[in-house]
Image (cartoon, grey):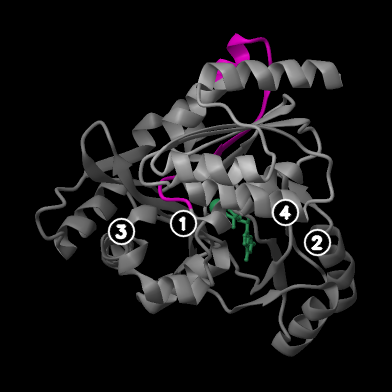
Amino acid sequence: MKFFEYQGKKIFKKEGIPILEGHVANSPEDVVEIVTEMGKPVVLKAQVLVGGRGKAGGIKFPEKPGDAFQKANELLNMEIKGEHVKQLLVEEKANILNEFFISVSIDRSQKSPVIIASKEGGVDIEDLARISPEKIIKSHINPLNEFLPYQAREIARKMGVETSLIQPLGNIIFKLYTLFDKYDAQIAEINPLILTDDGLIAADSKLEIEDDSIFRHKELVQLINYKPKEFAFVKLDGDIAVIGNGAGLTLTGMDMINLYGGKPATFLDIGGGASEKTIKKALDMVLNYPPVKVVFLNVLGGITRADDVAKGVISALNTTKRDVHIVIRLTGTNEAEGQEILKRANIPFEVSMEEAAKKAVEICSKIN
Ligand code: GDP
Ligand code: MN
């Protein structure tokens, strides 16, 4: 689960990491109202989940409220790396004296969290790692031991900041690690952590939490109004939608389509134990993807029950307005019931995956 900048900052604030005053806006009108109310210079920041927003023009500094309307309008019509900008963070403009970088992430090769810090923040850390790797301080943390404030200060000292900053910077590093640990984060990053006349402030936030730990963080899910994705759905450039239950089976389905000379239009894994409703949703999703000409639904029932799948298929086909060509491979748990339901509805199906894939490719080549 990825957090927008403003959401990450809410959590930063809750955990004692200072942020700037900011408000979320959905329209240029909102922005003008907020700017007027704040009565001080502001920054407009596009809220997207992809990185490199600043460089892509997603941050603007309006001179006066009138200018804010125009700039907000530009930002709200922008797309950053394929992501539509829907919200802006209107934030008090800071007078930046210095920019630092601090992050906590997981180093899989070391099987441990790693704190990465630099006194040269604001830039792309990847660029800095290439140009001046010596300016990046990396410290692996043993997650089984308690992380102590002195260790955080030690990192601040290694960063090479002036002595008076070691204590406050160490304090923020400590809080960031604590937050990372508390919320089962995959990454918690502040770039830049800025130095102003009011001290150190997180001017940006990047926060991602491990999806498998969400059950432990209900309050966060509420805070950010997060809706977990029901399935893994990837759009591809072919014309045969491949749907399967389980990632491995779905990939195999794609391989089969390729083997017989077809091209997958989607990878859609409905997961295990998919209900009638889920199947219907999955079919609706691929049917709403214009390049799809044929649907190849590949189900080997384990936890998933073939009769639920059959019911889902019928309900999706009954409600779609599109003329759908669908090839179903249905076998496994409750297959007799499932196949019976399809037969009664006059929907053909296969039991062999190879046969079904072959058929899907054949039908598709006739449509072309
Ligand atoms: P990112 O490009 O998505 O990482 O966006 P950031 O929030 O990190 O902002 C990028 C850069 O914009 C920062 O490194 C700053 O140099 C600048 N910036 C952001 N907020 C302010 C601000 O309040 N005042 C000033 N002067 N610069 C800012
Ligand atoms: Mn940033």
Mark 4 Cα-neighbour bin, 10 Å: few <14, some 14–19, many ≥20: many
**Residue identified by numbered label 1:** 1
Query: What's under tag 3, amino acid-wise?
Result: Asp
Tell whether label 3 touches label 4 (CB within 8 Å).
Answer: no
Residue 352, horizontal then vertical, whole percent: 50, 21
Q: Secondary structure at mark 4?
A: loop
Residue 42, horizontal then vertical, whole percent: 71, 73
Instruction: Identify the residue at image location x=36%, y=41%.
Output: 302
The image shows residue 15, relative to residue 233, as above or below, that is: below
Instruction: Identify the residue at image location x=71%, y=81%.
Output: 40
Point out the tag, 1 or 2, that comes first from the N-terminus. Answer: 1
Point out the tag, 2 or 3, that comes first from the N-terminus. Answer: 2
Real-space Cα separation, disc 4 to disc 3, in angstroms: 29 Å
Query: What's under tag 4, amino acid-wise?
Result: Gly
Q: Quadrant of residue 261?
A: top right
Q: Secondary structure at mark 3?
A: loop
Highlighted range, magenta: 255-274
**Residue identified by numbered label 4:** 58
Foreground residue, 268 or 107? 268
Point out the tag, 4 or 3, that comes first from the N-terminus. Answer: 4
Q: Secondary structure at mark 2?
A: helix
Residue 311, horizontal then vertical, whole percent: 58, 52
Instruction: Identify the residue at image location x=51%, y=44%.
Output: 338
Instruction: Identify the residue at image location x=78%, y=51%.
Output: 320
Real-space Cα separation, disc 2 to disc 4, in angstroms: 9 Å
**Residue identified by numbered label 2:** 76
**Residue identified by numbered label 3:** 184
Tell whether label 3 touches label 1 (CB within 8 Å).
Answer: no
